[in-house]
Image (cartoon, rainbow, N blue to C red):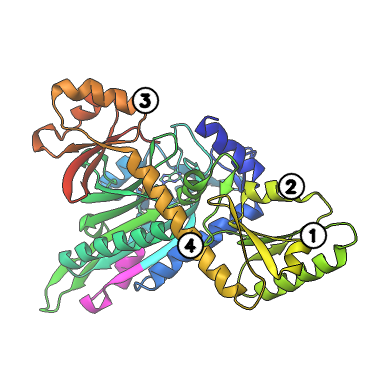
Amino acid sequence: MEFSEWYSEILEKAEIYDVRYPIKGCGVYLPYGFKIRRYAFEIIRKLLDETGHDETLFPMLIPEDLLAKEGEHIKGFEDEVYWVTHGGKTPLDVKLALRPTSETPIYHMMKLWVKVHTDLPIKLYQIVNTFRYETKHTRPLIRLREIMTFKEAHTAHATKEEAEEQVKEAIEVYKKFFDALGIPYLISKRPEWDKFPGAEYTMAFDTIFPDGRTMQIGTVHNLGQNFAKTFEIIFETPDGGKDYAYQTCYGISDRVIASIIAIHGDEKGLSLPPIVAPIQVVIVPLIFKGKEEIVMNKAKEIYNLLKDKFRVHLDDRDIRPGRKFNDWELKGVPLRIEIGPKDIENGKITLFRRDIEEKFQIGDNEELIDEMEKTLNTINENMKNRAWEKFDAFIKIVEFNESKIDEIKNILSEERGVILIPYVESIYNEELEDKVEASVLGITEYKGDKYIAIARTY
Ligand SMILES: Nc1ncnc2c1ncn2[C@@H]1O[C@H](COS(=O)(=O)NC(=O)[C@@H](N)CS)[C@@H](O)[C@H]1O
């Protein structure tokens, strides 16, 4: 099946997200999908909290004059902003924007908070909904008009060097985050012509979807003093002078959820890394005539043994085990425990690993908890390694010269994936995109060398 059809179908069949909301580019997280989102974003919260960030909340509405303050910034967003013009029947004297991102409201407040260098650094983040009137093809969780899970971090520092260090820290946080989710990535410095509006430069994380197209799943921007000068975030330096703050910001969105689904899924449906699986272990009792009692008792015993350590579900529906197996494989439950009378006699239980689709037996005794812990960690690791193998297979290094252009175009239109061209200053320009009929992701390090990365993107 073609990937985008698979993707749309799985969102519905695995009850993750409902696209039938009556506004284009807006959708509804169903409970199962919402849990995946919650476990995934708990990981990024922890990583940000551990690196000195504080979670906050800013208003969604931005007065027009505030949004328009930073010239580059508003130029980049003016075609995407939703406006609120009335309060009830009363026309508003100042139009209000629904935040497309929150540099302007946050930096307006930072001006009030920052006086001396000891007020810095400030490291804030919020996980909110933002709004962008996307004119390109909207897609559930991938290109939304209401971005429902927009984690935006914003920092202010007393020196340029500290802001540079912060960019590096943000990149490390994202690497840990995507590694925890088993999502492979290429990190590149976006070209001047494709950086975040108002930034000095943009570092981006791109993954590769099963159809070979790349997806920008996270970005880190060094804003220099551009916004600080516009918003007058000025502080007294240690020697009694004055300077503008040095800032960064970095964001991820619902695309993280889309990537978990797309990258780990297979023809049977979802396959979830245990770390974000709403149900990590499902217990399926194999009921045989006359043995119902002992099987259900054992199933309940195993459930009670595991329920405080894992997210476990006992499927006691009165339907055939095969139906249950299909249901839970579709929903990506990483581990299934089958309990039947024969196993009980031998003091065994049968486990089924969703990631490698293999069954194996272990003892149904006190080591069970350790065994489960080990198996779930093995599954997380295996899913990450397998995703990286697929990712690396999509990457091709091609020496660039005019005669190679057709070869590059063919690769990008057939297999797609990412083409890496050994970096040469003279070819690194916007015309390159027209030549190869694809996007320049930017400059990247791959296995120790410097390349220009090119790909068909979402
Ligand atoms: N329409 C959209 N739907 C879903 N995700 C999006 C959309 N637009 C951007 N994103 C995701 O949001 C991330 C951050 O957006 S951004 O424009 O690059 N950066 C910012 O807005 C900065 N303020 C950092 S928070 C992007 O890397 C991309 O992964």
Residue 166 located left or right of residue 335: left
- Return the disc, 3 or 2, that comes first in the chain's sequence: 2
Marker disc for residue 322 = 2
Of circles 2 and 1, the one toward us is 2
* Residue at the (23%, 68%) spot, across then down: 157
Of circles 1 and 4, the one toward us is 4
Where disc 4 sits, the SS reads helix
Q: Which residue is mark 1?
A: 316
Marker disc for residue 209 = none
For the C terminus, the image quarter is top left
Q: Which residue is mark 3?
A: 414
User: For mark 3, does the 10 Å Cα neighbourhood hold few (<14), some (14 to 19), or many (20 or more) residues?
Assistant: few
* Residue at the (27%, 51%) spot, across then down: 203
- In the rendered structure, which segment of residues is drawn in magenta? 108-123
Q: CA distance from mark 4 to mark 2?
A: 25 Å
Q: CA distance from mark 1 to mark 3?
A: 47 Å
Residue 36 appearing in the image: yes
Q: Which amino acid type corresponds to the residue marked 3 in the rendered image? A: Glu
- Return the disc, 1 or 4, that comes first in the chain's sequence: 1
Q: CA distance from mark 3 to mark 2?
A: 38 Å
Where residue 423 sits, quadrant-wise, is: top left
Q: Which residue is mark 4?
A: 378
Residue 33 located left or right of residue 47: right
- Return the disc, 4 or 2, that comes first in the chain's sequence: 2
Residue 209 located left or right of residue 304: left
Q: CA distance from mark 4 to mark 3?
A: 34 Å
Residue 264 located left or right of residue 77: right
